[in-house]
Image (tube, rainbow, N blue to C red):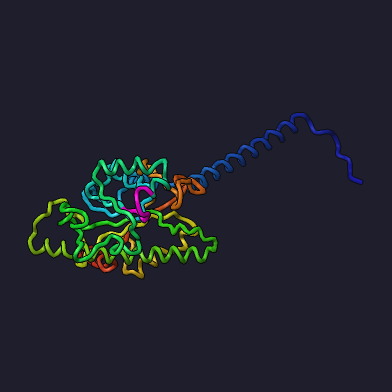
Amino acid sequence: MGRKLKGKPSHKSLKTTLQRHQVREKIRQLHKNKEQNKQQKKSQPNAKVRKNQELQKLNEASFSAFQKDETLLLVGEGDFSFTRSLIEEEFLKAENIIATSYDSSPSELELKYPHSFKENYDFLIQNKVKMMFKVDAMDLIKTLTLSKRNAWSKLLGSSWKYKSLQNIMFNFPHTGKGVKDQDRNIADHQQLIFGYFRSCKKLFELVNAPILEAKNSYDQGYTASEGKQDLTPEGYGNILLSVFTGEPYDSWMIKSLAKDNGLCVQRSHKFEWKNYPQYHHKRTNSEQETTKPAEERDARIYIFEKFERAKKAKSKDLSDEE
């Protein structure tokens, strides 16, 4: 049994004890708040980092894969809304664009995209854009019906006689097969992209080599704006590819496929949907929207160039610095 304490605690001593407890609690809370503020500051980027992030966002928002006077061949166009966006947003001149479709004719595309194709098609005709059909991204020379007899200028007209082909672009390649076996689906798309890279190289060589030779020999038919983008001696320009991020697209391993074709990434950028307001990404076999609206999906534009050219450019930069 415990010993009884003599006397009772006074009201004054209880009040003092309570005050001491309140002071200790206040100090503890101040220390806690200070520590929380410290951690919060650590997690937040400093002014320099924030500025760089803001600049990066601005650069992505205003990013263009081309210079305005360059030429472009688009393959795998759906309802031709991307081509239209490039012209309306003034990324490129209409007379420097060739838009192609894997489908066989305008009437087939009108059946497939009844609410969008006709308007886009009429817009491109009014702007005198070159359009072609039944063009296979994996076999461009054959499906464009190019040959020694049917040369580039004969196919496109005299205005293209001295225009080199500087860019080829394939937006969101898809086989359209809807294969449920994921491994087979990945393999099919790898085959498509590998064939696209190989086909682009052959087309660049066929189209640009004679133009470069003529330019070097006669130096006529060129304006200052033509040839802003340097071509390799073989005539290679830039090969562009837009793909969604995440699976199964990451498993396509497009950089490895490019490397196997002697190509490397010159640069890449986030695909900003708002830069192409007229562009509506559709299924390859109908006008239905994809499972998730494209505008809500992250994607990137990759720009590939010949590996040797990139290596030489890097060596030149280093020698300039020295």
Magenta-highlighted residues: 100-107
In the shown orientation, is residue 74 left or right of residue 177?
Answer: left
Residue 185: give x, y in percent of width and height: 49, 63
Q: Relative to 215, say whether 295 is above or below.
A: above
Q: Residue furthest front?
A: 107
In this rendered view, identify the residue nearer to me: 106 or 225: 106
Tell me if I can see residue 264 in this picture: yes
In this rendered view, identify the residue nearer to me: 75 or 305: 75
> Which residue is rendered at x = 55% and y = 45% of the image?
35
Q: Residue furthest right?
A: 1
> Which residue is rendered at x = 49% and y = 59% of the image?
248
Q: Residue furthest top?
A: 11
Q: Relative to 170, say whether 147 is above or below.
A: below
Tell me if I can see residue 52 in this picture: no
Residue 22: give x, y in percent of width and height: 66, 35
Residue 221: give x, y in percent of width and height: 10, 55
- Reply yes or no: does residue 62 show up in magenta: no
Residue 110: give x, y in percent of width and height: 39, 45
Q: Which quadrant would residue 24 be assigned to in this image?
A: top right
Q: Taken as a whole, is the magenta stretch helix, strand or loop?
A: loop
